[in-house]
Structure formats: structure tokens, C-alpha cells
Image: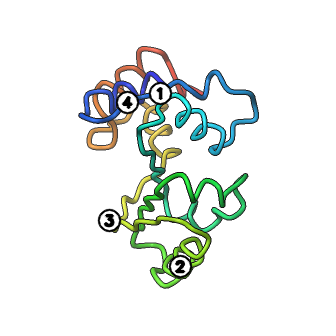
């Protein structure tokens, strides 16, 4: 939460929310979105996810309801077969979904690799916001 505030908190139109902290476990996206809609009834909500999440979206709790109350923005990287993601998108649209595909360049690094760089005292320049890296180092995160 604190790292999200550091990374995105200064962007116009972006609010970092702690709403999930007040919801019962397990945490399901549908519950979070319904709570946000209750708190902010005049706002529209969207979900940004990678192609891997879109490909298994129908396995999510109450996915059809989620499709009807949000816009899904899916980042499609070069390593996904565009034909496969397009077929999945058409299926989800047939269920009432508003799906927006966004092409993204493939960034050849994972969060695990970033944590390993931090653990080994290596540079993360260009991979993390400086304020986020400082927070991680100051709080001695990802040491093990």
C-alpha cells in the first residue's frame, strides 16, 4: 500500500485505496469493486490486468457480474499470441464485458528478479521509482 502511494499517488485522477483492508478474507475482486461502487456511486471503475489474467478470467468469483460493472483493460505483451487473447476477449464480450486491449512492449524482467536484485544490492534503476526503492531499502524488505 505504501509503495503504491509512492509510485502512483502523485498522478492526476489516481487514488490509492485501502478499501480491501476493511473487507473480509478471502479477498475477491468482485467484493472490492462492489464496495468501491457503494462508496463512490457516481464513479466508473476499470480493472487493468495482464493477458495472463484475462485468459483465466472466467475462473474468477462472479466474473460475469464483474464484467457488467467494470471496464477491463488488458495489457497484451508481445509474448502472448494475439489470436488467443482476441478469442478470449470476444468470449468475454459475449458475456457482457467491455474489454479494451492495449499493446505493450515486453519488459524482460519479473518482480522476482527485481526482488533478487534488491536482495543482492544491485541497481534497479529504470525498474522501480526511486522513492519505492528507498522505501524497500529503508524497511529492509525482500531480504530473504
Colour logic: rainbow
**Disc 1 secondary structure class:** loop
Observer-nearest residue: 42 or 16? 42
> Viewed as shown, does residue 116 lie left or right of 6?
right
Disc 1 and disc 2 in contact, CB within 8 angstroms: no
- Please identify the residue farthest to the bottom as the structure is shown: 83
- Please identify the residue farthest to the front as the structure is shown: 42
Dot 3 alpha-carbon crowd within 10 angstroms: few under 14, some 14 to 19, many 20 or more: few
Q: If the image is split into quadrants, where does the C terminus sit?
A: top right
Observer-nearest residue: 69 or 7? 69
Would you name the residue on which mark 4 appears? 15
Dot 2 alpha-carbon crowd within 10 angstroms: few under 14, some 14 to 19, many 20 or more: some
Question: What separation in Å lies between label 1 and label 4 (alpha carbons)?
Answer: 6 Å
Residue at image position (36%, 59%) is 107
Percent x, y of residue 101:
40, 68
Residue at image position (40%, 65%) is 100
Residue at image position (48%, 35%) is 41
Q: Is residue 94 above or below residue 39?
A: below
Question: What separation in Å lies between label 2 and label 3 (alpha carbons)?
Answer: 23 Å
Percent x, y of residue 27:
69, 36
Would you name the residue on which mark 2 appears? 90
Disc 2 and disc 4 in contact, CB within 8 angstroms: no
Percent x, y of residue 19:
56, 26
Would you name the residue on which mark 3 appears? 105
Question: What separation in Å lies between label 3 and label 4 (alpha carbons)?
Answer: 26 Å
Question: What separation in Å lies between label 3 and label 1 (alpha carbons)?
Answer: 28 Å
**Mark closest to the chain's N terminus, 3 or 1:** 1
Rendered image: mark on residue 70: none
**Mark closest to the chain's N terminus, 2 or 3:** 2
**Disc 3 secondary structure class:** loop
Would you name the residue on which mark 1 appears? 17
**Mark closest to the chain's N terminus, 2 or 4:** 4
Amino acid at each position: 500500500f505504501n509503495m503504491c502511494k509512492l509510485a502512483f499517488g502523485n498522478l492526476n485522477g489516481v487514488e490509492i485505496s485501502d478499501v480491501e483492508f476493511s473487507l473480509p478474507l478471502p479477498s475477491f475482486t468482485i467484493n472490492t469493486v462492489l464496495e468501491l461502487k457503494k462508496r463512490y456511486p457516481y464513479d466508473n471503475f476499470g480493472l487493468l490486468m495482464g493477458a495472463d489474467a484475462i485468459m483465466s478470467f472466467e475462473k474468477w468469483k462472479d466474473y460475469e457480474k464483474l464484467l457488467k460493472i467494470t471496464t477491463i483493460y488488458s495489457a497484451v505483451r508481445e509474448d502472448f499470441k494475439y489470436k488467443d487473447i482476441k478469442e478470449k476477449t470476444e468470449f468475454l464480450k459475449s458475456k457482457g464485458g467491455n474489454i479494451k486491449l492495449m499493446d505493450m512492449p515486453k519488459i524482460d524482467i519479473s518482480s522476482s528478479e527485481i526482488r533478487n536484485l534488491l536482495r543482492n544490492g544491485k541497481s534497479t534503476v529504470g525498474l522501480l521509482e526511486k522513492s519505492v526503492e528507498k522505501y524497500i531499502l529503508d524497511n529492509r524488505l525482500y531480504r530473504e
